Each structure stands twice: as structure tokens, then as C-alpha cells.
Amino acid sequence: MKNLIQTLKNIWSIEELRGKILYTILMILIYRIGAHIVLPGIDPQAMEAGTQANTGILGLIDAFSGGAFNTASIFALGIMPYISASIFMQLMTVLVPQFQKMQKEGESGRKKINQYTRYLTVIVTILQASAYVTYLKGMTQQSGAILPGFAPYFWLSTVVLLTAGTLFVMWMGEKITDRGLGNGTSLIIMIGILARLPQSFLQELSAKSVRNGQVLIFIIEIAILIAIILGCILLIQGVRKVPVNYAKQIVGNRQFGGARQFLPLKVNSAGVMPIIFAQAIIFIPTIFANYNTQSSGFLQAITDQSNIWYMVIYSVVVIAFTYLYTALIFNPKQIADNLKQSNGFIPGVKPGQPTADYIGAIMDRITLPGAIMLALLGILPGIAQRLGVTQQFATFFGGTSLLIMVGVVLDTLQQIETQLLMRQYDGLMKGGRIQGRQTSSAVQM
């Protein structure tokens, strides 16, 4: 406890770090206040009475927006349109030569890509806002949440406000990244997810304390949740270290190279992207149905996390997308060329194409267990729900929410520790350095 207090004092004594933390907290408070501002023309009480818990892609959007989706807030779409646009532009930089060239231009190229991402965000937000208006009209048709006098202007005002709200959230995320602590977009998503945790925790505790003997089951659930979080940390930080030797070079009277290092290959190079892609692909029919999940048995099956067919299809899609996305972002040929240029080589493997084949073979082997573990983590909320955990609390047992929370916390703690070590303070942990999601992927250009 004494060490913890001293560490907090060290953090607060660094003026730059203190300013970053306070600025980040201010932006988060503004975001959470905006998440409770209801759209014009909506009766909040009627909206709350007619709201039902969403699952599938609707539950994902509501989780990322911190419950603003279900409450018809001006931040109802949250940061999701920006994430969709960023993912699309990231794929374009891999698949389209013009965008690849633009990315290699340095800072000017990145500025162009960011500008295109913002333009695409506006288009995606307008499309999603239009579908959200249809969803609101269908959901509030019986409850009468939309005020009759505002109905003629509801579509236009809602689309404009939702677009402005998403752009404002995007701006806050960029400001947090520039002047705050950590990645702004990831922090906003994490705060939205954590905003639902207290209520979900209390609901689960209330459900288990009603009947005698259920409190013990609740304690077991918490222990299992902690074990899953530990496993998630291992999945995020797990690497296969490939030994690399560097040839000795003598320049004048000085010797360079000759050291033995390691090339860290991540078990889960794709991160959370396969889960997001899988959920987007599976729930495309619900988007075309204007978020109507009551149309057929098929739509009900793919929006129910506890459905067996959903788990099977979801697992197969996650594994397939893990291999696909890893192949897109991981280039063994480029890594082999970089090693060759820096006079590095893997012992027993010839430089050039043999090195690329060797690295590619290792990635293929370690990606399979990583993909299986990622798929298992994705279906854990459905399994927990089938075992009696309430729907809201089950979302924290795995899936996108848990991966994002653990990854963002690791990245943020790593940045804080870096600031401490730069000023000759002790790190956050005595047992070693904290590794974030980006630490072991620095070699993957």
C-alpha cells in the first residue's frame, strides 16, 4: 500500500503527466454528459419505458456508446462510424497501391489518409443515422416516444445531430490522443463499456442474492471473470521469440553489431479486428432490415449470443478472419528484407526468401491457437448467458468488450510507466515492465 501511494505521488508530481491526466478526464466527462442528452423530439420517459435490451450488433453499438444508443442520445452512434471508416481506410492502404504510396509519403501522406477517413466518417454516419431513425420509429410506434408535433422534422434534425455528435466524439478522441493520455478513440470506447459495468454488476448481484445459496455462485462468477481477464492478458501479450543474430561490423576503431536479439511474433497479431469483422459480417442482414431482429428465425438466431448456431458460425468466421487479417497486416517478405539490410539473420536460415518462408511458417503455426483462443473468447458471453449469468453482465466475460478494456488499460499503464522511467522514477511494477498491445509488434511494419 505504501508503494502504491508513493507511485501515485510520483505520477502527480510530473507536471506534464498530470496535465495529460486532467485533460483526459475533462474530455471523458464532456463525453459522458453528452451521452445523457436526448435527441430533440424524444420523450425520455416513454423512451425508457419502451426500450428493450439489445443483443448482437445493436448491443455492440450500445456498449461502445455507453448506453447512449438505447436512450436516443445525441451521441447514440458514438465512435462506431469513425471506427468503420478507419478500418476501411486501413484495408485500402494494404490493398490499393495508391493508398500504399500515400502511406509511405510520411506525415503528409498520413494527413491525407486522415482527411479521407473524416470524409468517409460523415458518409457512414449519415447512412447509419438514417437507419437509426427508422429503428426509433419502429421501436417507439407503440410507446409514443416521438412527439407528434416534432414528427415532420424528426428525420432531418436527428440525422444532422447524430452526424454532428459523432464528429464531435471523433474530435475529442483526436484531442485526447494529441494532448491527453493514451489513444483517444480506444479510451472513449473503454469508458462507454465501463459505464455499463456498475449497473450490470448490481443486476447480477441482485439476481443471485434473491434465492438462498446464490451468493456463493456469484463469488464463483467473479473468480472466473478474473481468470478470464488473466487469460485475455496472456492472449494479448503472448509472443513467439525468434532468435536473430547481427553480423559484426568494424568502423574505424569501433565495433557494431554482433548482438543476439529476438524477433517477437505475436500469437494474436490481428487483435480485436477479427471479432469486429465477424460481428459486422454476421449481422449485415439486420442492418438491411433496419435493425429489425424480429423478422425471421434466422435473424433471431444470429442476434442471440447464447444460440448454438450463432456460436458455431461466429467461431468459424472469427478463425477465418484472423488468418485473413494477419495475412493482410503481416508481411514476412518485408521483415526478411529489413533483417537483410540491417545485417541480421536467423541462425540456420539463409537470408532473403528462405527467411521469409521460415517466418511465414511460424506465423501460420502460432496463428491457429491464437485464432481458436480468440474465437473462444468471443463466444464466452453466450456460454456465460446459457449458464445463468444475466445478459448485461455476461458481456464482460469475453468478446470485444473485454479485449478492448484489457488492451486499453495495458496501453495506458505502459505510457504512464514510460513517463515515470524517463524521469528516473521506479516503474509501476517491480517484477518487470508493463507491455501494451504495441510493444511486441514494433517490428511488423
Image (cartoon, grey):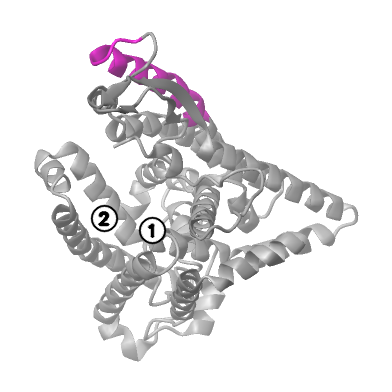
- Residue 367 part of the magenta segment: yes
- The foreground one among 240 and 377 is 240
First to last magenta residue range: 349-372
Task: Tell me which corner region of the image, top left, top right, bottom left or bottom right, holds residue 199.
Answer: bottom right
Q: Residues within 10 Å of mark 2 (few under 14, many from 20)?
A: many
- Residue 304 visible (yes or no): no
Residue pushed farthest bottom? 149
Cα distance between the residues tagged 1 and 2:
20 Å
Task: Tell me which corner region of the image, top left, top right, bottom left or bottom right, holds residue 198.
Answer: bottom right
Q: Earlier in the sequence, mark 1 or mark 2?
A: 2
- The foreground one among 262 and 281 is 262
- Residue 409 part of the magenta segment: no
Q: Where is residue 163 drawn, in percent x and y?
A: 27, 72
Residue displayed at 48% across by 57% down: 422
Quarter of the picture holding the N terminus: bottom right
- Residue 250 visible (yes or no): yes
- The foreground one among 76 and 286 is 76
Q: Where is residue 44 drawn, in percent x and y?
A: 49, 83
Q: Residues within 10 Å of mark 1 (few under 14, many from 20)?
A: many
Residue displayed at 24% across by 67% down: 126
Question: According to the image, label 2 marks what residue?
Answer: 85
Q: Which amino acid does the dot numbered 1 rest on?
A: Tyr
Question: Mark 1, mark 2: which one is toward the viewer?
Answer: 2
Question: According to the image, label 1 marks what residue?
Answer: 291
SS of the residue at dot 1?
loop
SS of the residue at dot 2?
helix
Question: In the rendered image of this protein, does residue 105 appear above or below residue 152?
Answer: above
Q: Where is residue 118 drawn, in percent x and y?
A: 21, 63
Q: Main secondary structure of the magenta part?
A: helix
Q: Which amino acid does the dot numbered 2 rest on?
A: Ala
